[in-house]
Amino acid sequence: MSAENRTADEVRAEIAETRAELQETAAALAAKTDVKAQIKQVATAKKTQVQNAAADVKQAAAEKAAEVKDKAADVKQAAADKTAQVKEAAAGKTAAAKGAAVQKAAEIRDAATARTAEANRAAADSGTRTAEANRAAAAAGTTHRATVAGVQQTTTETASRVAESAAEAADRAKHQFTDGDPATVARRPLPFAVLAAAAMGIAAIAATILRRRR
């Protein structure tokens, strides 16, 4: 755009811009020549940089502390969970062991009860057999006593008959050996009845002795 075509406002704006640029250039030149100002500016910049670095370090430390705290909380929670799991497992094992012990005790008690009942039945059977044996022995004893009594009665009767026969034979022998003269009596043989009576007496006595030994 040519200078003839510009308006007054545009000219004034251009002048103001040029003035501002000149002021900035003058300020920069003045700052470069002002050593104190430069040192103060550098110090301020360094201070700001250090403050920012300290803030960053503080922020990083805070974040690290929060992270460590979170990790510690996680470890603590994991330890608590593990402890709860161990307790639960131990409780389960204890309950299982207790249940097994109760079941084993019940089995032992049932077995002992069964054995006791079996022993009682065996004792009852033994008592029954003993009673039967006693009754049999009593019956046998009665039979034996009856047999002995019968044998004794028979022996007594036999002995009585033998004694009677012996008496009769002795009487006949007396008459045989007393009637007549001595020569005739000496020639007479021993009567058979006497011999038979003596043999019967001996046999009866032997039978009695044998029965008593039995």
Image (cartoon, rainbow, N blue to C red):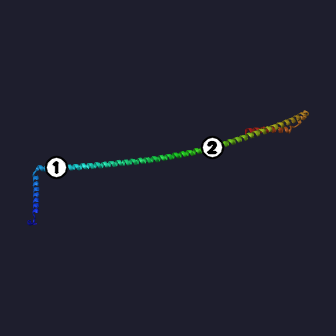
Amino acid type, label 2: Ala
User: Quarter of the image holding residue 113?
Assistant: top right
| Residue 162, quarter of the rendered image | top right
Tag of residue 124? 2
Element assignment for label 1: helix
In this rendering, position of residue 87 left or right of residue 195: left
Can you tell which mark lies on residue 57?
none
Q: Nearer the viewer, residue 20 or 124?
A: 20
Image location (x, y in percent) of residue 78: 36, 49
Instruction: Please rate how many residues cluster around mark 1, counting C-alpha atoms within 10 Å: few if below 14, some from 14 to 19, many from 20.
Output: few
Q: Residues within 10 Å of mark 2 (few under 14, many from 20)?
A: few
The residue closer to the viewer here, 151 or 17, is 17
Secondary structure of the residue carrying numbered label 2: helix
Find residue 40 and report its horizontal and vertical position in percent.
Answer: 14, 49
- Residue type at mark 1? Thr
User: Where's residue 202, x and y in %?
Assistant: 79, 38
User: Distance from label 2 to label 1 (Cα)?
Assistant: 117 Å
What residue lies at 27% left-to-right and 48% top-to-bottom? 62
Residue 2 vertical position relative to residue 131 in the rendered view, above or below: below
Residue corresponding to mark 1: 44
**Residue 119 shown left or right of residue 17 in the figure:** right
Locate the C terminus by quadrant.
top right
Q: Quadrant of the N terminus?
A: bottom left
Dividing the picture into quadrants, the one containing residue 26 is bottom left
Taking the image as shown, residue 179 lies to the left or right of residue 87, namely right
Residue at x 54%, y 45% (from the top left corner): 109
Q: Answer with mark 2 or mark 1, whichever residue precedes in sequence.
A: 1
What is the x, y in percent for residue 193? Answer: 85, 39
The one of 108 and 158 positioned closer to us in this rendering: 108
